[in-house]
Image (spheres, rainbow, N blue to C red):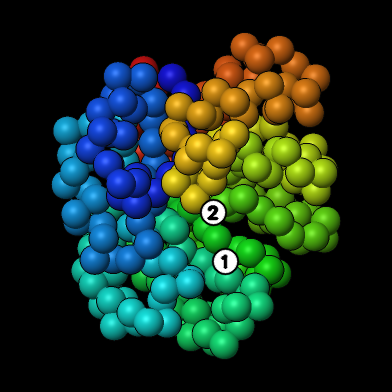
Amino acid sequence: MIIDMHCHIDLYKNPQEVIKDCIESDIYVLSVTTTPKAWKITNDIAKDAKKIRTALGFHPQIIAQRYNELELFDELLPNVKYVGEIGLDGSRECLDTFETQLSGFRRIIKSIHQRGGRIMSIHSRNAAETVLSELHNVNGISILHWFSGSKTELTTAINQGCWFSVGLPMLKSKKGKEIVSHIPKGKILTETDAPFTKHDGNISMPWDIELIFPELSNIWHSSIEDTKEQIFSNFKTLVINNNMKEDIIS
């Protein structure tokens, strides 16, 4: 079984077909959402897919425009094991909403903390220092999606016990390879961030996770088979240590 820990299934043109193919290909997918309103619809279309979990999200690039959905987020939180995509975006085009993002992020992680924690898929582009500061001592497991922070921020994240989901675009860049080479093997999971990523001009699909293993193998100096086993072992550790009771890992 291969694992895609960050995929926007609902944003494909044909999500039902993607789900069908994931089932046939024995792929586990964490289907992240960008707004609380999107969660129920996305969860419903994957309800019969044993190996697809729908995360409750509120993307930092959207939260300022739909801030009133924070109440819905709080209502839905008891129904989910996973939260994502949440976080902060400090890129130039998002700076004018940063304070609103931060206010919303604080409210979200406060709710998560008060409810005993969740596994969270987190966006931290150009905002890793602030994201890590806000997450310090918050209940739950933070998976930093497509981490691109500095070496100092990476060290802080590792020391805080963060996990990391890495995809092919990250592993094709010099900086991305350098970051991955410093992350403990046992804290890495795989992702596509599809359909926002492409390979050879085509929109990425969850089964393109297979393309990640040769890149990770080169960094780890291990066989592809050993690399696959490491990622699956990491996933098992993640869910077992957090009492997720996932029957898919047996």
Say which amino acid is labelled 1. Leu
**Position of residue 150 in the picture relative to residue 55 (left or right):** right
Q: Give the CA distance from mark 2 to mark 1.
A: 8 Å
Q: Provide the residue designation for mark 2.
A: 142
**Position of residue 166 in the picture relative to residue 174 (left or right):** left
Residue 135 lies, in percent from the top left, at 57, 66
Q: In this view, does 90 lie above or below 25?
A: below
Residue for point 16% across, 47% down: 44
Residue 215 lies, in percent from the top left, at 71, 27
> Quarter holding the C terminus?
top left
Residue 39 in sight from this viewpoint: yes
Residue for point 35% across, 56% down: 33
Q: Provide the residue designation for mark 1.
A: 135
Say which amino acid is labelled 2. Ser
Residue for point 69% across, 32% down: 185
Residue 1 lies, in percent from the top left, at 43, 19
CB within 8 Å, label 2 to label 1: yes
Number of residues whose C-alpha sits closer than 10 Å to that of mark 2, classed few (under 14), some (14–19) or many (20 or more): many
Residue 103 lies, in percent from the top left, at 48, 83
